[in-house]
Image (tube, grey):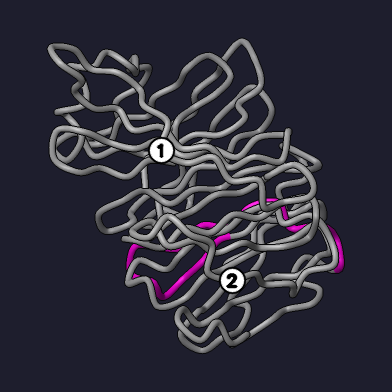
């Protein structure tokens, strides 16, 4: 996960060693370097999810907790203990008003940012099976989740209810990731082991498939016009171009730009 500011950006990652680490990529003298900016040991088990919006940062882990941080003061501001299983994924809504979380305990939860009140929870979002990933549409009105029940589910965040479910068991028994594209959110992607399928919202079908030699652990959509300045750092290599969207990979690992 990264945040950008001018000519520099910050990469924030969670580790299996329970640490939340941050590195700023900035100019030091005549060259650019990664300078450590965060080293938090708040979790008691591996960190599985990290997300941010403006100055807010949230991390979730196998210790079943969600830790909240202020990136201005660089201090922890609170802990959410709603889940009873590993927190697999966290996402802020685009307007930063809500934090959405999903867990191995089978639940999908929505917290109001600020007072951190639990606004909505679906205890058995995927029939009681673990929920592996959640992605919020750029409009903030919809969300997608994938879970261990081999389904892709769509959620109406305006009305706070399930919209519909799609069985994807023929492609993957336990899909691990789902991601909306940016902009108008016209596409979304779901990886199935070594293949990544890109779906069109308009046609409700697969418009492109990417076959790789190893398992796809995660991916992201990047708008070329917004992120072309990053190319000069030579940190990413392009594999596929779909209209104005770049999907970039670093072997089996990808950087997710938020």
Q: Secondary structure at mark 1?
A: strand
Q: Are marks 1 and 2 in contact (CB under 8 Å)?
A: no
The answer to which of 162 and 72 lies nearer the viewer is 72
Q: Within 10 Å of the Cα at label 1, are there few (<14), some (14-19), or many (20+) other Cα atoms?
A: some
Please indicate whether residue 175 sits to the left or right of residue 180 in the image: right
The answer to which of 14 and 255 lies nearer the viewer is 14
Residue at the spot 41% in from the left edge and 75% down from the top edge: 141
> Looking at the image, is 161 positioned above or below residue 57?
below
In percent of width and height, residue 170 lies at 76, 40
Q: Which residues are magenta?
A: 128-144
In percent of width and height, residue 218 lies at 56, 34
In percent of width and height, residue 40 lies at 58, 46
Query: Could you tell which of marks 1 and 2 lies nearer the N-terminus?
Result: 1
User: Quadrant where the N terminus lies?
Assistant: top left
What mark, if any, has residue 37 been given in the picture? 1
> Looking at the image, is 196 positioned above or below residue 145?
above
Residue at label 2?
Answer: 78
Q: Quadrant of residue 32?
A: top left
Q: Quadrant of residue 151?
A: bottom right
The answer to which of 29 and 89 lies nearer the viewer is 29
């Amino acid at each position: 996960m990264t945040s950008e500011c001018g000519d520099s950006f910050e990469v924030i990652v969670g580790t299996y060693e329970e640490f939340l680490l941050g590195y700023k990529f900035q100019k030091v003298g005549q060259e650019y370097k990664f300078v450590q900016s965060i080293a938090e040991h708040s979790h008691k088990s591996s960190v599985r999810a990290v997300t941010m919006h403006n100055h807010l940062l949230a991390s979730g882990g196998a210790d079943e907790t969600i830790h909240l941080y202020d990136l201005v003061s660089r201090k922890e501001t609170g802990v959410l203990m709603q889940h009873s299983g590993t927190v697999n994924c966290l996402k802020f809504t685009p307007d930063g008003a809500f934090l959405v979380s999903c867990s191995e305990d089978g639940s999908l939860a929505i917290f109001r940012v600020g007072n951190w009140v639990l606004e909505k929870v679906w205890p058995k979002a995927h029939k009681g099976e673990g929920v592996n990933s959640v992605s919020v549409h750029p409009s903030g009105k919809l969300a997608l989740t994938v879970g261990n029940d081999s389904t892709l589910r769509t959620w109406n965040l305006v009305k706070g209810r399930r919209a519909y479910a799609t069985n994807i068991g023929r492609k993957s028994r336990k899909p691990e990731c789902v991601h909306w594209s940016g902009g108008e959110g016209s596409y979304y992607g779901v990886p199935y082991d070594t293949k990544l399928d890109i779906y069109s919202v308009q046609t409700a079908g697969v418009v492109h498939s990417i076959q790789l030699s190893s398992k796809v652990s995660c991916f992201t959509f990047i708008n070329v016009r917004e992120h072309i300045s990053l190319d000069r750092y030579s940190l990413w290599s392009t594999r596929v171009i779909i209209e104005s969207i770049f999907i970039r990979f670093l072997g089996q690992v990808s950087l997710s730009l938020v």
